[in-house]
């Protein structure tokens, strides 16, 4: 199982930016599909963005974050990132990174489905004030 440690959360005002990081260990990073999820109080965990660590680094985003969030990876550092710009109060949530051994599912919407992943980080809190 992959060990994942998130960092970079915090409190910002609306319109601000944050960059989340997720350090991975215990598995060959380039063999992983990885994604960011978030969960607000009283709501279900939802997929935010996903990326296939190998190949062309194809990405997928939830409609709510398209054009504002960017997922990326540094294979040399085994680290996943989420750059969040133009933050809104609705983005307030605990953010989690997740990883799973890659497969064909990495190339479609399943990459941001909760039930595709077995390895999860502990989460990092993002709070956006108006």
Image (cartoon, grey):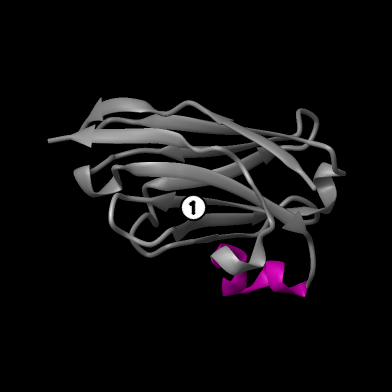
Which x, y percent locates residue 90?
Answer: 23, 49
Question: According to the image, label 1 marks what residue?
Answer: 37
Residue 66 or residue 126, whichever sits in front: 126
Q: Residues within 10 Å of mark 1 (few under 14, many from 20)?
A: many
Quarter where residue 84 is shown: top left
Which x, y percent locates residue 118?
Answer: 69, 57
The boundaries of the magenta stretch are: 104-113
Quarter where residue 108 is shown: bottom right
Q: Is residue 95 above or below residue 46?
A: above
Q: Is residue 6 above or below residue 97?
A: above
Residue positioned 62% across, 65% down in the render:
111
Q: Label 1's element? A: strand
Q: Is residue 97 above or below residue 109?
A: above
Residue 58 or residue 110, whichever sits in front: 110
Residue 78 seen from this side: yes
Residue 56 seen from this side: no
Which x, y percent locates residue 37?
Answer: 49, 52
């Amino acid at each position: 199982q992959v060990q994942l440690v998130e960092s970079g959360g915090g409190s910002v005002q609306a319109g601000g930016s944050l960059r989340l990081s997720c350090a991975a260990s215990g598995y060959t990073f380039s063999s992983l599909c990885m994604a960011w999820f978030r969960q607000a109080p009283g709501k279900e965990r939802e997929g935010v963005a996903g990326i296939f660590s190998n190949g062309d680094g194809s990405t997928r985003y939830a409609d709510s974050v398209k054009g504002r969030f960017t997922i990326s990876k540094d294979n040399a550092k085994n680290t996943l990132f989420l750059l969040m710009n133009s933050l809104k109060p609705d983005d307030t949530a605990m953010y989690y990174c997740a990883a799973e051994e890659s497969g064909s599912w990495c190339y479609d919407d399943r990459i941001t489905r909760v039930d595709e992943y077995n390895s999860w980080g502990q989460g990092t809190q993002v709070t956006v004030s108006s």
